């Protein structure tokens, strides 16, 4: 039998995508450090997944052995998810993401588009779920997100002689959609020379624009990939540690460099548009992307007491809580499951009538819905816990 009256330890899968952090001498990638796994200089450590998505479900460590969390939630929905859960699936996913190079230029579909894409190409779009997400910076974190006003993009593009094949296709005042369409319509055989000429032109300019500088960096990382030209179309941002950014569905973006916490709906749907050797789907991009200029949406945390931050994006699937030297009392929390990881220090996990469990740095856990009481208690100073749960109407602060 499974025991749902206590915290359940998780073993979480790692994604070794090419853009992930690598070891540099004595500097160990964050994810390798958290998991305690040995690494070499060549292996990239990109994402650590805490969740129950079929693409990479965590393993729940139970008295009956290790069981995929997806299977455990499916077999025992009331105990894992709660009697009021709308489906037999965990609706949120928590990740640690670390990028040394840029991710692909991508967007994620909303629910209606995800349903259609999954039905048409399940091998490419593995679930029918939307993928709103939040990124919370753990280090300085660079990203490009959402379209700039077209006038700003056009002004930067007009400065570059090398981009004449792009400009020559324009109408008098192209829309953002037309800017994308004409950029992607540049004949493929001409792209290598265009990008080489652009790189040389930027290098020779004593006053390049921020878009020029980013484009040059992306061209170095992704030779002969026209996706670098999206640097002229999207906002670029630098997040300080603790700052957070919300990425709505249908929003083009690429994370560029840094370490962060990702919270999202439980989905693995990615529409790629460039900066990757993986399959690019421009058809899905033009069907789904919001071609309007929007300022990036920063999410400010709220909560009390000191040491508690709650990030609530404008979507119902999830919220992210970060607690430093703070005890979380489950009796003060709303019903439902939560996933959490010890980012720093160590914690004691107390459940009624159960032996205390020790949670060292890097350990990941499920608090199942059936666990109504108990606490997560720091054992050392500077103990930091990151926790994901379904979004609540108002943040529920810990008792202490």
Image (spheres, grey):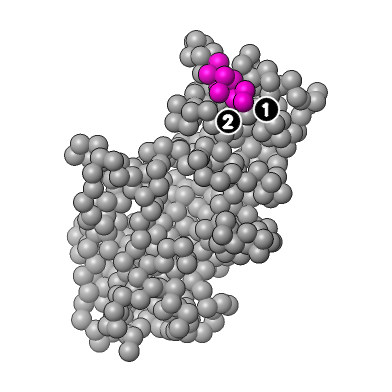
- From the viewer's perspective, is residue 261 above or below residue 140? below
Q: Which residue corresponds to mark 2? A: 226
Quadrant where the N terminus sits is: bottom left
In depth, the one of 313 and 183 nearer the eye is 183
The numbered dot on residue 186 is: 1
| Residue 288 shows in this picture | yes
* Drawn side of residue 324 relative to residue 260, left or right: left
CA distance for labels 1 and 2: 9 Å
Q: Nearer the viewer, residue 277 or 268?
A: 277
Instruction: Give the prevailing secondary structure in the magenta stretch.
Output: helix
Q: Are marks 1 and 2 in contact (CB under 8 Å)?
A: yes
Position of residue 121 measured from the top left corner of the image (x, y, whole percent): 63, 59
333 vs 37: above or below: below
Q: Magenta span covers which residues?
A: 189-197
Residue at the far bottom in the pictured view: 1
Q: Earlier in the sequence, mark 1 or mark 2?
A: 1
Rendered image quadrant of residue 126: bottom right
Look at the numbered disc 2 and give the secondary structure of its residue.
helix
**Residue 222 percent across, percent down from the top left:** 48, 32
**Residue 213 placement, left or right of 43:** right
């Amino acid at each position: 039998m499974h025991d749902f009256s206590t915290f359940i330890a998780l073993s979480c899968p790692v994604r070794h995508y090419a853009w992930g952090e690598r070891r540099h001498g004595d500097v160990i990638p964050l994810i390798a450090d958290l998991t305690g796994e040995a690494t070499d200089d060549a292996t990239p450590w990109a994402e650590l997944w805490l969740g129950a998505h079929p693409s990479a479900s965590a393993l729940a460590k139970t008295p009956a052995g290790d069981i995929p969390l997806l299977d455990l939630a499916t077999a025992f929905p009331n105990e894992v998810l709660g009697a009021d859960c709308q489906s037999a699936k965990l609706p949120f996913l928590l990740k640690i993401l670390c990028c040394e190079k840029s991710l692909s230029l991508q967007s994620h579909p909303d629910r209606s588009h995800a349903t259609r894409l999954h039905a048409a190409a399940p091998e490419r779009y593995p679930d029918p779920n939307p993928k709103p997400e939040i990124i919370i910076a753990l280090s300085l974190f660079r990203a490009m997100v959402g379209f700039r006003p077209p006038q700003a993009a056009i002004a930067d593009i007009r400065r570059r002689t090398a981009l004449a094949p792009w400009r020559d296709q324009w109408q008098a005042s192209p829309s953002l959609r037309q800017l994308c369409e004409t950029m992607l319509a540049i004949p493929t055989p001409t792209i290598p020379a265009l990008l080489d000429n652009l790189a040389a032109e930027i290098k020779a300019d004593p006053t390049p624009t921020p878009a020029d500088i980013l484009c040059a960096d992306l061209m170095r990382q992704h030779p002969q990939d026209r996706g670098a030209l999206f640097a002229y179309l999207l906002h670029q941002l630098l997040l300080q540690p603790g700052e957070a950014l919300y990425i709505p569905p249908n929003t083009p973006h690429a994370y560029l460099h840094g370490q962060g916490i990702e919270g999202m709906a439980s989905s693995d749907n990615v529409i790629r548009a460039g900066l990757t050797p993986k399959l690019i789907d421009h058809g899905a991009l033009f069907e789904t992307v919001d071609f309007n200029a929007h300022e990036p949406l920063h999410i400010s945390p709220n909560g009390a007491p000191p040491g508690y931050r709650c990030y609530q994006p404008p979507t119902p699937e999830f919220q992210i809580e970060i607690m430093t030297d703070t005890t979380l009392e489950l009796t003060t929390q709303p019903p439902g499951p939560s996933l959490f990881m010890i980012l720093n220090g160590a914690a004691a996990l107390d459940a009624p009538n159960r032996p205390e469990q020790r949670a060292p740095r890097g350990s990941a856990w499920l608090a199942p819905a059936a666990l109504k009481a108990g606490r997560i208690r720091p054992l050392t100073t500077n103990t930091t816990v990151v926790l994901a749960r379904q979004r609540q109407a108002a943040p529920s602060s810990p008792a202490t």
